[in-house]
Image: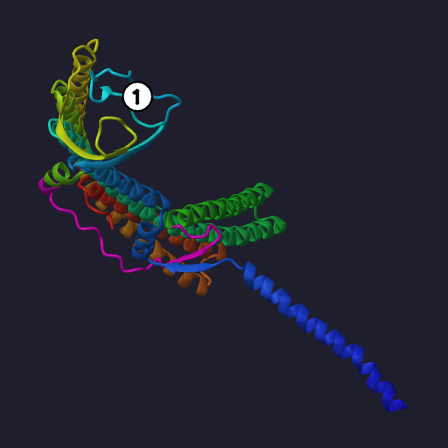
Amino acid sequence: MRFRQTHRSSHPLLAYLLLGAIATFVLGTAVHAQANPSRTLTLSQAIDLALAQNRSLKLAQLSVDDSRHKKEIARASYYPQLANHFALLHVTEVEGVDIPAGAFGNSAATGPIPGQKLFLSQGTFTSYQSITSLNQPTTQLLKVHEANRAATADINTAKAKLSEAEDEVALNARQLYYNILIAQLKRDAATEEVAAGEVKFQESTDDVTRGHSLEVVALESHAALLDARQAVLTQTLHLHDLTLSLNDLLGLPLNTELHLEPDANEQPLILPSREECLHLAEANNPDLLAARQSVIKAKASLASAKDAYIPDVTAFAHYDYQSGISFLVHNFGAFGVTFSYDLFDGGRRNAQIQDAHTILAQAELSLQKLEDEITVQVETAYDKVQQLQQMVGVAKESLDVRVEASRLSDRQFEQNAALASARAEAHAKSVSARASLLEATLGLSLAQGDLKRTIGQMPK
């Protein structure tokens, strides 16, 4: 009996253990399912991912495809048009011919011709007709040619816009990537300042307790500590916003945790000389390319408006089958030429030509204006790059000084020749100098990327 009681008492324990294991497994699975995805990226990988997955670029590519399809539609007007027309007609009454008796004479041998009244019907109540026609425009091909020129210009414009969008996405990816690294360093620097502020606040509090300093010193230390904590919170929020923006730009889930490589061996952007940049911008700038295509399209519209004065001449050939229509055989063919011309349109065609002239003048003037603006942009961007290169050099020297000061502060602290707060402040300034260097590097990288985008090259 004792053994049986012990055996029975083990069943609830096993049940509890089993339920606990199941609950642990389910909870662990749920937590793992809810965990945010993680991604480690270098700068080049981030740019490539943005170019492959960005939704704005996909829309720009669809715009190119749309322009190509419209060009195919315009090109189809060059070819003959083969069509079939079928009609079924039922009428309630048909006309006929009455021939009275003796209408064709009265012979002594045969009597009246015809001998009785006759009625000859014309057609039937239900008739069928099928027409297979082949039409070839001739003079209209001039308008078709101009429409194809305009469609080609639209394709080239869409390609230029796509290239411009790719450059913009690559530049934005570079900017967000560096901004996240800068925000991380600034957050780390603010964290170091919090640690230094806590030590300094404790030191000032001890000095007040010993009577070595006034209470206002402790209050100032406390205020500085609170400012540092606020800076940590601000940088954390800013870092979160930047991460969301970069995830959206890369086409990743917004809750993806990004681990960016700060020490990635990215090659600096290689820039041509100033003169070469001016020539490249004139030949490859996306805005200039789009403006030139606008001029081509405007010229095509002007030529098409002038072609409206040319008569429409169309050659045709068709084969007909009919049943039920009087005086026509069942199968017959026809061919010929149609001629169409508007004798009076109230001045519409002349107004269209004047409007086309105005649009062309606007396009040419916009092109000239843009050419001058691009030249100014190249000159300004090149000067900015040279200035930022000097700033990066100064930031590097400042970082070397701060790192050396931090090293000396550590040695003095070990020798009891410096306070812990001084050591913490030196470390915080070293991290801040590193963030400043990265910020200067970002400015230089963006300036170089903007210059490459202006001259029509991918900033990567």
Q: Give the camera-side residue of 259 and 29.
A: 29
Q: How many marks?
A: 1
Q: Is residue 363 left or right of residue 16?
A: left
Question: Where 219 sits versus 127, above or below?
Answer: below
Q: Quadrant of residue 43?
A: bottom left
- Whether residue 407 is visible to the viewer of this picture, yes or no, is yes
The N terminus - image quarter: bottom right
Q: Is residue 166 magenta?
A: no
Q: Is residue 175 left or right of residue 151?
A: right
Q: How is the image coloured?
A: rainbow
Q: Is residue 272 magenta?
A: yes
Which residues, given as a range, are shown in magenta?
251-278
Question: Where 49 sits versus 175, above or below?
Answer: below
Q: Residue 254 location in percent, x, y?
A: 46, 50
Q: Give the camera-side residue of 73 and 447.
A: 73
Q: Residue 330 location in percent, x, y?
A: 23, 35
Q: Residue 418 location in percent, x, y?
A: 45, 58
Q: Residue 24 location in percent, x, y?
A: 65, 69
Residue at far front of view: 109
SS assignment for the magenta stretch, majority: loop
Residue at far right of view: 1
Q: Quadrant of residue 169?
A: top left
The amino acid type found where label 1 is placed reads: Leu
- Residue bearing mark 1: 118
Number of other residues with Cα within 10 Å of mark 1, as a class: few under 14, some 14 to 19, many 20 or more: few
Q: Is residue 65 left or right of residue 405?
A: left
Question: Where 140 sits versus 257, above or below?
Answer: above
